Image (cartoon, rainbow, N blue to C red):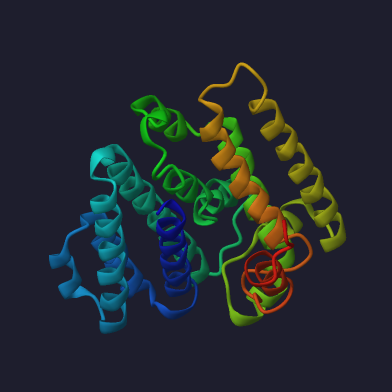
């Protein structure tokens, strides 16, 4: 159940990301952002038709999740809050794109670690964990602990390094690469060297947070680390998520269709 629900949330995230990146006008995106903030079916009336389909699906997915985890209501409400935070960050990036703004790295990272989706997906991954997930767990994840922050940085920087050229060609908000190059007068190669150092340091932070004593139970930390590991696989040498027919397809095939016999 947990994997199925997380898959649906990831799918919705991809669709919403494309709406903000590619399809929506700034005026439409403002309406969609307000609708997500309201989180009510009546808010759909003001949306253009293509957004209504997405908004309906978004509410349906979260309704399904909340029905499945009726005894874990704290997860449902927290997931909605994380989704709203993410959509607000998408809208901020859309405004940057509208005026062709290249923010400072500090401005960019503050928003882009949210749009990378990692904090929201980490919260969603707690579905089905039962009593190990408590109010303190959500207080912890909302405090932006080092392990979640480090994982989000890994996600954002690895994604941007392999995808920025393709995305800039199609018209996309400036990535971390463009922001760093402009702010520091660096070449693309120098920027990649610096980002790889930051990714390495982020993994060190993750390792540190997993050492005893831990802030939360180990099963919670394991979910966070597993998501970071997925990011490392998907964006190691290319944008395997956008171009999933390449290396990612082979990974899925070897794991599900042609697994190694045990």
Q: Which corner quadrant of the image does residue 203 belong to? A: top right
Q: What residue sits 35% from the left and 70% below the top? A: 29
Residue 178 visible within the image: no
What x and y, as percent, mark residue 198? 75, 43
Q: Residue pushed farthest top? A: 213
Q: Residue furthest left?
A: 42
Left or right: where 148 falls relative to 141: right
The image shows residue 236 at horizontal and vertical percentages of 76, 59
In this view, 195 is above or below 188: above
Q: Which of 115 and 230 lies nearest the eye of the viewer? A: 230
The quarter of the image holding the C terminus is bottom right
Depth check: give the residue in front, 141 or 174: 141
**Residue 25 visible within the image:** yes
**Which residue is located at x 53 percent, y 50 percent?**
118
Task: Identify which residue, 214 or 26, lies in the foreground.
Answer: 214
Q: Is residue 177 left or right of residue 137?
A: right
Whether residue 11 is situated above or below residue 115 in the rendered picture: below
User: For this view, does 61 lie left or right of residue 41?
Assistant: right
Question: Which image quarter: residue 189?
Answer: bottom right
**x, y percent for residue 160:** 68, 61
């Amino acid at each position: 159940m947990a994997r199925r629900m997380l898959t649906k949330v990831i799918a919705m995230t991809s669709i919403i990301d494309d709406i903000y990146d590619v399809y929506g006008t700034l005026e439409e995106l403002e309406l969609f952002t307000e609708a997500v903030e309201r989180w009510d079916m009546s808010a759909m009336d003001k949306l253009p038709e293509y957004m209504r389909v997405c908004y309906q699906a978004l509410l349906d997915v979260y309704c399904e999740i909340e029905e499945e985890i009726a005894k874990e209501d704290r997860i449902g409400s927290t997931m909605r809050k994380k989704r709203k935070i993410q959509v607000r960050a998408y809208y901020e990036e859309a405004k940057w794109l509208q005026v062709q703004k290249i923010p400072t790295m500090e401005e960019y990272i503050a928003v882009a670690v949210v749009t990378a989706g990692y904090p929201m997906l980490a919260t969603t991954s707690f579905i089905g964990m039962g009593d190990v997930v408590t109010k303190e767990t959500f207080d912890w994840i909302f405090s932006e602990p080092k392990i979640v922050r480090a994982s989000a940085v890994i996600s954002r920087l690895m994604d941007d390094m392999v995808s920025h050229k393709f995305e800039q060609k199609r018209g996309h908000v400036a990535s971390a690469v463009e922001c760093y190059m402009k702010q520091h007068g660096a070449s693309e190669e120098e920027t990649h060297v610096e980002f790889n150092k930051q990714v390495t340091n982020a993994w060190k932070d993750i390792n540190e947070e997993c050492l005893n004593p831990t802030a939360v139970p180990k099963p919670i930390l394991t979910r966070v680390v597993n998501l970071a590991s997925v990011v490392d696989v998907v964006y190691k040498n290319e944008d395997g998520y956008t171009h999933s027919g390449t290396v990612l397809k082979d990974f899925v095939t070897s794991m599900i269709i042609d697994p190694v016999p045990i």
